[in-house]
Image (cartoon, helix red, strand yellow):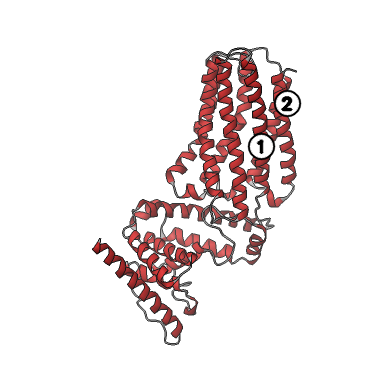
Amino acid sequence: MNVVQAQHLLLGSIFAATTVYLAFLTLRPARRTLSLKVAAPSSLLLAAIFIALASVDFDSRRAEVAGWMLRELPFTLILAYVCLAQAGALPHRFGAVALEEVARRPRLEALLRTAPLVLVASWLLPGAAGLVWPVPVLRDFSPAPPGLVLLEWALVLPTIFYCALVAWLFLRAARSEAAAPRLRTKNLFAFAAVLAWLLMSLNAMARAAVRVWVPDGLREAIVGIQLAAQSMLLAVSMIAVALALTAVHIPALGDKALRAAYSLWLHSQGRFEARRWALVKSGRIKGLFRLSHYVTEAAERLGLQEEETLKALTTVQLAAILTDKNAKTSGIDPETAKDLHELQRKVQHEGSLAAQIQAQIGRGLSVQELEGSDSDPLHESLGAALALTGHDADEFLCAETAGDRPLWHYLAGLAVADAGLSREHRFPDVPLPDELPEERAAYRRALKAYEDAKRAILLTVEEG
């Protein structure tokens, strides 16, 4: 067995050890995520490929290129899967939603969706060229013609680009303060795994250049160091992958209907939030920036907590979007909003499901952290926006227990009414009952704060 075969055997052993650990994880239903179901067989396949390459002594360069293509294909497909998962482009039943950073950037989502096409093309075209003009692609210590650089770099450059993009997204997700600690930890391990993968790709590019342009003697020494670095980076990457998959939990529900409802809830909420952020950032909703400015200033005067201010702002944004004709072309309309709100209500009011989510999930979602309770910010804001715009009168505005309304409800209602978005016969035009003096005081506080904030902002604009 030569040195290159020994290197393949070492890498195959790393994948084999990873496969054993991932197989152990699959025994626990609470950890049997889609990513684990993809990672375990992929690791087993890579172990088999590397061990097979270690036992084969290629007698032709075309056979060597075919072995090289076989070795690189699983890496290509795995990276394409990760890109699609980050973009939230996997089937609904898997419950995958886009990362928060991706949800807010439609162009970034489109870029991630192109990954399968670009990566498969970057694998197929150099492989086809190598079969026509074969080079010693697997003989790491032997000199090689310049065609090796063209083949390796054509394969590796797109991989480096998407690895850098994926690693940056995982790092952003790991630093998100809105996510649960376990989710942040999982994303940090995922970042480490992809970063190691990125460094391995850079190492492969450098090794091809060394084989082409570095003279004998020095070439063997450099390649030996590069192969050792490749082994260490692969070990680091596999350890990080194993830890990332260990940190993930999904609800271990016995009822398939509840599991399907939960997955659909995650996907629907993620897609709705992605479209909402795209509309808000695009500036297409007339007057939304001005209203948000008023609400933020009024919330500071009322001393609202950050979460309450966010609920009020989200309510105003949703109300503006639901009444804007342009928003319908982006997939957000009253019917879509009502469907999502009803799905949220069904899932969150299911006692057994909510209890299991609270007990077993230690992670957040891609857009906001959900804890399976009625205090979900989007659920409350969506219900308020539907009621303010006259699309759902049962939950928020026409409730008999008006005393349940917090200050942020009143503030959002005032802003929506000020913009002419609420139905005329509903809050805040109708005075509150006399038997609720405390609520009338709260309403007046919100009204005064909103009027003062608006007056101050307009005065500042005029002076400016």
Q: Which residue does the image show at 73% across and 50% down from the upper left?
A: 28
Residue 226 vertical position relative to residue 402 in the rendered view, above or below: above
Q: Which residue does the image show at 36% across and 76% down from the upper left?
A: 448
> Horizontal placement of 306 versus 284: left or right?
right
The answer to whether residue 365 of the structure is visible from this angle is: yes
- Disc 1: CA contacts within 10 A as few (<14), some (14-19) or many (>=20): some
- Where residue 241 appears, as percent x and y from the top left, is 65, 41
Q: Nearer the viewer, residue 274 or 145?
A: 145
Residue, far bottom: 435
> Horizontal placement of 370 versus 355: left or right?
left
Q: Which residue is mark 1?
A: 236
Q: Nearer the viewer, residue 406 or 226?
A: 226
> Horizontal placement of 394 versus 261: left or right?
left
Give the position of the N terminus as an image quadrant.
Answer: top right
- Quarter of image, res 212: top right
The answer to whether residue 427 of the structure is visible from this angle is: no
Q: Nearer the viewer, residue 153 or 218?
A: 218
The disc labelled 2 sits on which kind of residue?
Answer: Leu
The disc labelled 1 sits on which kind of residue?
Answer: Val
Q: Secondary structure at mark 2?
A: helix
Give the position of the C terminus as an image quadrant.
Answer: bottom left
Q: Which residue is mark 2?
A: 9
Q: Secondary structure at mark 1?
A: helix
